[in-house]
Image (cartoon, rainbow, N blue to C red):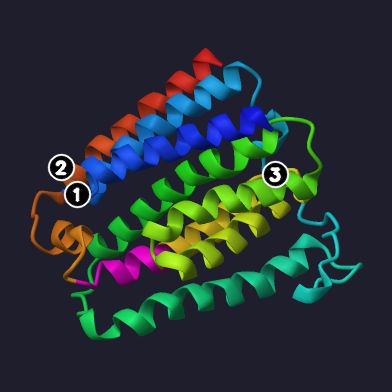
Amino acid sequence: MVVISILILGIWSVEFLVFRFVVSKSLFAAQLARLLAGFIIFNFCYYFGFIHSDFLNFGDLSAMASPVYWLGIGETETWKTVSVGFLFSISLVTFLSLYIPNKKLLKRPKWSFQWFFIILFLALINAAIEEILYRLIPLSVGNLSPATLALCSGIAFGLPHYFGHPSKWLGIILAGFLGWFLAKSVLETQGIFLAFLFHWVQDILIIGILSMSKKTSIYRDITEDKKVFIKGILPTTITLIVLSAFTYFAI
């Protein structure tokens, strides 16, 4: 439990530094910084045995989901059936929680391949980083019960979203529930795929809505910066390839 607490505090410190000094300038720069920090933490934890390699796979979607009666998950349901309904319902809640309070600030975008590709790209990077930091690492540490590990992951993921999207107490509650649910899927399927898929879809919705708000840096990145590919996507992609190659050959 002490190790989990230290790791979570370290992750929060990284998130605070990145968002305090980088995110206000460019979402691309923030994601690049988080990517670097995430890979450093991942390699450190993997090298010292803090991450179970069993989780680094697709997982068994035919695995039984442990019952959660207040969510309507019964004793005979598999993750394949559970995931379909919950992906839709969670995505709907995410969309409404952002769209309703911000609908007056949104501007319809000029649909383009660049706009769509950037949203998918940023969501992909963000989901991958946060699944490493908030699922793979906390769920691999210690000899705690699966229920306790899932709860720790939910708390660790929920609290920083006081400053996220959606924000404040609603952000904590929604992100905390999502973090717990995704941790439950990782532990019971023994794989990261479902958690990553759910997370990626939510980030596509969040970044998509933020990209239509003039108050956010991503709107400026996409609509005003004509060199967005060279300044944002290209360095992030190169960094991802280099770090992935380093991880593969070093570990």
- Residue at x 86%, y 58% (from the top left corner): 64
Q: Which mark is residue 18?
A: none
User: Which mark's residue is nearer the viewer, 2 or 1?
Assistant: 1
Where is mark 2, residue-wise? Answer: 231
Locate the N terminus by quadrant: top right
Q: Which mark is residue 191?
A: 3
x and y percentages locating residue 198 in the rendered image: 57, 60
Q: Amino acid at mark 1?
A: Ser
* Front position in the image: 136 or 237: 136
SS at badge 2? helix
Q: Amino acid at mark 2?
A: Lys
x and y percentages locating residue 24 in the rendered image: 19, 51
Q: Is 109 left or right of 127, judged from the image as shown?
A: left
Q: Is 160 left or right of 110, judged from the image as shown?
A: right
| Residue 72 at least partly seen | no
Alpha-carbon span between mark 3 and mark 2: 34 Å
Point out the residue furthest to the top here. Answer: 250
Magenta span: 204-213
Find out whether the residues at labels 1 and 3 contact each other: C-beta distance under 8 Å.
no
x and y percentages locating residue 211 in the rendered image: 25, 67
- Sequence-first tag of 1 and 3: 1
Q: Main secondary structure of the magenta part?
A: helix
SS at badge 1? loop
Q: Residues within 10 Å of mark 1 (few under 14, many from 20)?
A: some
Q: Amino acid at mark 3?
A: Gly
Q: Which mark is residue 26?
A: 1
Q: Is residue 33 above or below residue 201?
A: above
Alpha-carbon span between mark 2 and mark 1: 10 Å
- Sequence-first tag of 2 and 1: 1
- Residue at x 49%, y 45% (from the top left corner): 130
The stretch drawn in magenta includes residue 22: no
Alpha-carbon span between mark 1 and mark 3: 32 Å
